[in-house]
Structure formats: structure tokens, C-alpha cells
Image (cartoon, grey):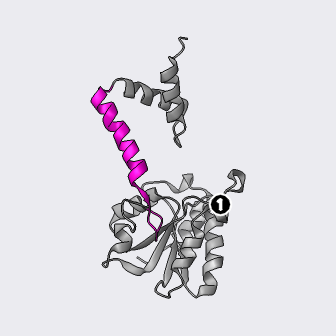
Amino acid sequence: MAKQAAPLQLLVEQFSKFAGVGRKNATRMAYQVMSMSDAEVQALADAIRGAHTKLHRCKICQDYTEEEICPVCQSKKRDHSVICVVESPRDVTVFERTREYNGLYHVLHGLFSPVDGIGAEQLCIRELLARLQDGEVKEVIMATSPTVEGEVTATYLARLIKPLGIKTTRLAYGLPVGSSLEYADETTLYRALSGRGEM
């Protein structure tokens, strides 16, 4: 098998660092870059540099923004009595696409993961608790992933918030639309039953 040129190997290695991108996809991406024109490569490099230098965390919700405070936190049309706690800025985008949620967000930038050395100090928990001190927030929705790390994080936060007298809720997780019951695991079925609603 022919060895890749060093600059191409380096590009593959950089793409491999992206979460969810294996060596095969990283190689595809590297060859895709090689097939681009100089102008396209420059535009890609500028977009990466621009995102990295112009975006920073909103000083309130910790989502990415160009301004000191993001448009969601600034909006007078949003319900400021509800905060939806999410793992990453990607999750905010997902919720916004539904056009069903009108409250505010708080981005943790991760979940508890002792194996990876991620504890309370590495997450934006202090910032969340600071937001809950003025009495305006009436409900905090835990929208972390239905994984062990997501559940542990949500439970930990709920314990911190409970003494403040603020309602803490968890997203209902259940069966995906179009799936069959025979393929559902016990935890999914339990959550589907627990989160059932009236018809």
C-alpha cells in the first residue's frame, strides 16, 4: 500500500480529532480538501478561523455568540422564567429548530465523566446557579442525554437546585416514532411509560 505524503497524513490526523470521525472518513475529508480550488480552500480556512476568533461564550447562558450576550438571552419575547439545561451548543440549535420552546437555555459544555476527568469544576454549573438567585426562574428543564453521564449530571443539578425552591423537570424519553416495541430496551420502555401523556 502506497504511503500518503506527509502533508496529507497531517490533514487526515487533524480531521481524525473530530468527534465521531474515524480514520476512513478523515481520509475522505482530506482528499475532498485536495480536490477543492485554492479559493474554496481559502474560504474554508477563513470560516474556521472566523468561527474560532469571533465567537465566544455568552456571559449568561454559555452558548456561542458574537456579542457579549446572545440573541436568545437578550430577547424580551422569550420566557425568562424557564431555563432548559443542555450539554452542548449543538443542542440549542436542535431545540430552536423545533420552534416549540420559548424559554432560555444554559449550556453546560459537557457532562460528568470521571473517566475523562470531567467533574463539576469543568462544567458551567456555577454560572447556572448564579442565574437562579434573582427569583425570576420558576422551572429548570434537564435536557441532558439519556445516558449514564446525562442522568448523573441531571440528578446532581436537581439536588443543587431543589433547595432553591425552583421546579426541576426532566425531558420525557420514550419510543422513537416509527419504531417497533420488540426492539425497545427495558429502560426506553420504562421512560416511555413514565413520560406518557393524556390523549
* Above or below, comparing residue 26 to residue 153 in the picture: above
Q: Percent from the top left, x then y, of residue 159?
A: 65, 77
Viewer-proximal residue among 104 and 70: 70
Locate the C terminus and report the quarter of the image it occupies. bottom left
Identify the residue at horizontal 57%, vertical 66% (top origin).
Answer: 124
Magenta-colored stretch includes residue 62: yes
Residue 144 belongs to magenta span: no
- Determine which quarter of the picture holds residue 177: bottom left
Q: Position of residue 14 (x, y in %)?
A: 51, 34
The amino acid beneath tag 1 is Phe
Asked if one can make out residue 102 in the rendered structure from this viewpoint, the answer is no
Mark 1, Cα crowd under 10 Å, few <14 / some 14-19 / many 20+, is many
Q: Secondary structure at mark 1?
A: loop
In the depicted structure, whether residue 182 falls above or below residue 163: above
54 lies left or right of 174:
left
* Rendering coords of residue 28 (x, y %): 44, 27
Residue at (52% x, 27% y) in the render: 10
Instruction: List x then y, in percent, for residue 20.
Output: 53, 41
Residue 45 vertical position relative to residue 147 in the rendered view, above or below? above
- Quadrant placement of the N terminus: top right
Q: Foreground: 181 or 139?
A: 139
Q: Is residue 115 left or right of residue 157?
A: right
Write down the region rendered in magenta: 36-63
Residue at (66, 71) in percent of width and height: 156
Residue receiving disc 1 = 112
- Location of residue 68 (image quadrant): bottom left
85 displayed left or right of 199: right
The kind of secondary structure the magenta stretch mainly shows is helix
